[in-house]
C-alpha cells in the first residue's frame, strides 16, 4: 500500500511516499529556514505563501523519486493539526484537491502522531508499547504509544517547548534562527558544568517547564556573559534542557511498565541528546530508538506512515476535513469528519 504524505504545519514544505507504513520510498523537504532567518523566527503569512508556491513541485519530486505515479497511490495523508493555521490550510487544500482529482482516500494526521511514527520508520521492528518523547519547536510531550490507534500524553510542557527554549536562548546569545543546531555545535566545545542553570523538576510530575531556564539565561547574558565562553554557556544550557528530558522520559517508561523508549521532533536531531538517551536507557535496561536527523525534523514520511495506519483501520476523512492550530482533539482521530 503506497501513501503520499504532505506536511506543511510550520516552515518546511514536505512530501513523501511510504509503502506499507514502514518503507520510505521518497522524502522531499523544502526548508524555509533561510527565508525566516532574517526575521529571527517563522513569519506565518510568509510561510503560508511559500507553501503554496512549493507544494506541487515538491509533491511531483516525491512521486518521481519514489517511481510511483498517481494511479499507484492508495491514499493521501496530510497534517491537519496542530500548527500555523494558514500553513496547514495550504497543505490540506492541496491534499483535498489531489484526493478529489485522483479519487483517493484522504486522511488527516495529527503532527505529533507523525513524530511518534518516525521511530517505527527508523526501526521497523519496533513493537508497541513504547514511550516516545516528542520535542520540537512547538511540542514537548511524553507519549505512551500502546498501538497505532492508542496514544496518550503522560506529560507535556506547561510553558515553552524545548525547541522554543533552544531558539529563544540562542537569540539572547546572539545566534541566528533556528538556534538549536548552533547551540549543539558550540556545546560540543564547551563545559556542561560551567554554569549551573536551573532544572525545573516540578516534583514527581512528568510535565516540563522551560520558561525559568530562559529567564536565567537572559539574566546571565545581561550580567555575566563577558566572563564565560559562549561554548560553555551553550553546553550548560544544552545540559540543563537534556537532563530533564532524559530523566522524565525514563521515569515515564518505568511508570508505564514499558521497556522501550524513543525520541522524535526537531530537538531529537540533537546528537548529544540522542547519545544521552541511548546511554541512560541502556543503563536502565531499556531499548532506545533514536531516528536519523532527517526523520526527527519535520518531514512528510512520518505523516504518510501515520496516515497509512489510519487507512488500515478503515478510517478516512471527507472534504470537510478541517485544520486546527491547537492541539484540541484526541491524538489518534482525524480531527475532521472521520468516517
Ligand atoms: O520538529 P521541528 O522540525 O518543527 C516543529 O514541529 O517545531 O523542530 C524544530 C525545532 C527548532 O526549535 C530547532 O531549533 C530545533 O527543533 N532543533 C534543534 C536541533 N535541530 C533542530 N534543537 C537542538 N539541537 C539540534 N541539533
Ligand atoms: Zn514537528
Image: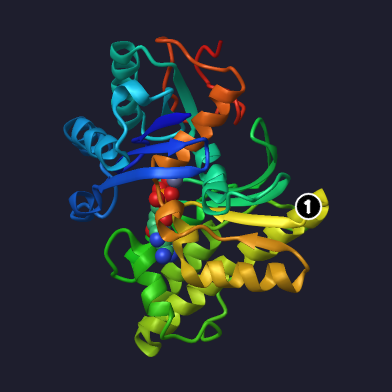
- The location of residue 241, given as percent across then percent down, is 55, 66
Residue 199 visible: no
Does residue 56 sit above or below 272 in this rendering?
Answer: above
| Quadrant of the frame with the C terminus | top right
Q: Is residue 19 left or right of residue 61?
A: right
Label 1 lies in ligand 2 vicinity (Cβ under 8 Å): no
Does residue 284 sit above or below 229 in this rendering?
Answer: above
The residue lying furthest to the bottom in this view is 227
Q: Hey, which quadrant is residue 96 in on the image?
A: top left
Comparing 184 with 58, the one in front is 58
- The location of residue 114, given as percent across then percent down, is 50, 40
Residue that numbered label 1 is attached to? 258
Q: Hey, which quadrant is residue 3 in on the image?
A: top left
Ligand 2 sits in which quadrant? Answer: top left
Q: Residue at x 39, y 89 (%)?
A: 227
Q: Mark 1: which secondary structure?
A: loop
Residue 70 visible: yes
**Image color mode:** rainbow
Comparing 111 with 48, the one in front is 111
Q: Is residue 164 left or right of residue 151?
A: left
Q: Is residue 256 left or right of residue 142?
A: right
Q: How crowded is mark 1: few (under 14 residues within 10 Å), some or many (20 or more)?
A: some
Q: Residue at x 57, y 79 (%)?
A: 196
Q: Is residue 64 left or right of residue 265?
A: left
Does residue 212 sit above or below 321 in this rendering?
Answer: below
- The location of residue 232, given as percent across then percent down, is 44, 84
- The location of residue 39, given as percent across then percent down, is 21, 52
Does residue 298 sit above or below 214 in this rendering?
Answer: above
Amino acid at each position: 500500500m503506497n501513501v503520499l504524505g504532505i506536511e506543511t504545519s510550520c516552515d518546511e514544505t514536505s512530501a513523501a511516499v511510504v509503502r506499507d507504513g514502514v518503507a520510505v520510498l521518497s522524502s522531499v523537504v523544502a526548508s524555509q529556514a533561510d527565508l525566516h532567518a532574517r526575521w529571527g523566527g517563522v513569519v506565518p503569512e510568509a510561510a503560508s505563501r511559500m507553501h503554496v508556491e512549493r507544494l506541487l513541485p515538491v509533491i511531483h519530486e516525491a512521486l518521481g523519486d519514489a517511481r510511483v505515479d498517481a494511479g499507484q497511490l492508495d491514499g493521501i495523508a496530510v497534517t491537519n493539526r496542530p500548527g500555523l493555521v494558514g500553513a496547514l490550510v495550504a497543505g490540506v487544500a492541496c491534499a483535498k484537491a489531489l484526493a478529489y482529482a485522483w479519487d483517493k482516500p484522504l486522511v488527516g494526521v495529527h503532527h505529533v502522531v507523525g513524530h511518534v511514527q518516525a521511530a517505527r520508520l527508523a526501526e521497523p521492528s519496533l513493537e508497541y508499547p513504547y514511550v516516545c518523547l516528542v520535542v520540537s519547536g512547538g511540542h514537548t510531550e511524553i507519549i505512551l504509544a500502546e498501538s497505532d490507534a492508542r496514544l496518550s500524553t503522560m506529560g507535556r510542557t506547561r510553558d515553552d517547548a524545548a525547541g522554543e527554549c533552544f531558539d529563544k536562548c540562542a537569540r539572547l546569545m546572539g545566534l541566528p534562527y533556528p538556534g538549536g543546531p548552533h547551540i549543539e555545535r558550540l556545546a560540543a566545545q564547551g563545559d556542561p558544568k560551567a554554569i549551573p542553570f536551573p532544572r525545573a523538576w516540578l516534583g514527581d510530575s512528568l510535565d516540563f517547564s522551560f520558561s525559568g531556564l530562559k529567564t536565567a539565561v537572559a539574566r546571565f547574558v545581561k550580567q555575566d556573559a563577558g566572563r564565560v565562553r559562549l561554548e560553555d554557556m551553550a553546553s550548560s544550557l544544552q545540559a540543563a534542557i537534556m537532563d530533564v528530558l532524559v530523566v522524565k522520559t525514563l521515569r515515564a517508561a518505568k511508570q508505564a511498565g514499558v521497556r522501550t523508549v524513543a525520541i522524535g521532533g526537531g530537538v531529537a536531531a540533537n546528537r548529544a541528546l540522542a547519545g544521552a538517551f541511548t546511554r541512560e536507557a541502556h543503563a536502565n535496561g531499556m531499548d532506545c530508538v533514536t531516528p536519523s536527523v532527517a526523520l526527527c525534523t519535520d518531514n512528510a514520511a512520518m505523516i504518510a506512515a501515520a496516515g497509512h495506519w489510519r487507512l488500515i483501520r478503515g478510517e478516512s476523512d471527507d472534504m470537510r476535513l478541517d485544520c486546527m492550530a491547537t492541539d484540541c482533539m484526541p491524538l489518534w482521530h482525524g480531527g475532521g469528519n472521520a468516517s
